[in-house]
Amino acid sequence: MIPETKRKPTFPIIPDLRTYLTDYNREMELPLVYEDLKGFRESMPLRDAHGRDTLWETVIYDPEEMRRLNRDLTEIYAVLKVDGDLSVMQHLYVDRVDFCTFGNSHPFRIRIVNAYNDNQDYYYVKKADASRVYGLELEHLLSPNRINYLTCGTNLVEEHISGIPGDVFIDDWLYSERLNPVRVAKELVKFNERCFIRLLGDMRSYNFVVDVTPDFEGVQVRIRCMDFDQQSYDGRKNFYLPQFFKENSKLAVYCMERLNRTTAIQYQREEQALIYRRVQISRDRLARLLAVMGRDEIAPAENVETLRASLREHYGNPAFERCSTMGELVAESLQTLSRNVRRHDPATTRQIFDFK
């Protein structure tokens, strides 16, 4: 099991990363910034349907300030969703603003409501962190999920990633008769692989959601990351493998009980091949991102050194010794994956879980 880790510092967006974001339409001028939302006059704890503390607080502003915020926050939602076309957003309004002091980014969550049908949607306003931006971009390029976010100076705006929170899924859904156990176990193997290959850490159950989709034969599930603060920061190899967190132990056991080693390795190789194809599709953009990330200091030197040694041993690849930053380690991880997939080399297939 992975012990608790110290809080990660926030890293600024360097000029090269800003240029990348601008060129790919991620950097935008916005009518409101994070600091504008900190002027609330009071707050109250937000509880869920069962009366439990959600760790969020609903904040209250002066009426005139709320009118201004309603206009600006609705405009940001329009920029995020329809490239700023306010003509199709006149019937929307801000129903609630929540604030969370838990975690690194201290986000504000904005609830937008459609006045015609009461449909709700959410998005988040946060302080920008380079680690998180790299994590969002790598998720967009290398996972089966597209990510919608914007930056504006030191601010970050993200759309809501919908799904059942991982801890709730484990407690309330894992043993549901509506789910196919093998499909759940397969997705956990594939999720484990996606995180490890691109070095996204800290995927405890409260940092991912499970998207449950009815299919013509049963139900499909997909695990989606929703916290990207720990992109390539920690020095421990197992920190990038969700299977090792105590919060995920029930999922790991569930997986081991339903898959044998041969089948698990098949699913692992399937995901490696999919990541390889995504690397080929986004080759130029990914190369540019990794070049910027390779020049950025987003982790202490001792973390890079520890992880570098672990990955060299894991893959049996001395090329990792040439890496001096976390970005270079991610690039070498993807290069190693691509090379081994092309050669049908089993070197990227490690022992996962503890299958019999």
Image (cartoon, rainbow, N blue to C red):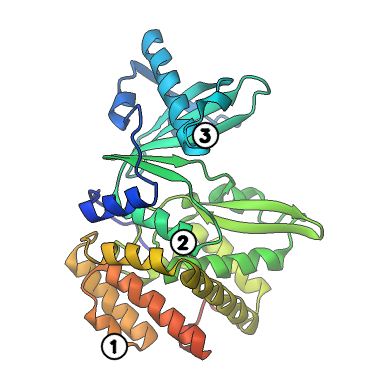
Vertical comparison of 344 with 267: above or below: below
Label 3 Cα neighbours within 10 Å, binned few <14 / some 14-19 / many ≥20:
some
Q: Which mark is residue 318?
A: 1
Residue 333 visible in the shown view: yes
Check disc 2 and give the amino acid type: Leu
Q: Quadrant of the C terminus?
A: bottom right
Where's residue 117, x and y in %? 68, 23
Vertical comparison of 164 with 291: above or below: above
Check disc 1 and give the amino acid type: Pro
Residue in the image at 52% along x and 34% along y: 122
**Residue labelled with disc 3:** 122
Viewer-proximal residue, 147 or 302? Answer: 147
Real-space Cα separation, disc 3 to disc 2, in angstroms: 23 Å
Reading the chain from its start, which is encountered first: label 3 or label 2? 3
Reading the chain from its start, which is encountered first: label 1 or label 3? 3
Real-space Cα separation, disc 1 to disc 3, in angstroms: 46 Å
Q: Secondary structure at mark 3?
A: strand
Vertical comparison of 336 with 94: above or below: below
**Residue labelled with disc 2:** 141
Label 1 Cα neighbours within 10 Å, binned few <14 / some 14-19 / many ≥20:
few
Contact check, label 2 and label 1, Cβ < 8 Å: no
Question: Taking 234 as reference, is 211 left or right?
Answer: right
Where's residue 304, x and y in %? 24, 70
Residue in the image at 28% along x and 81% along y: 320
Residue in the image at 29% along x and 88% along y: 318
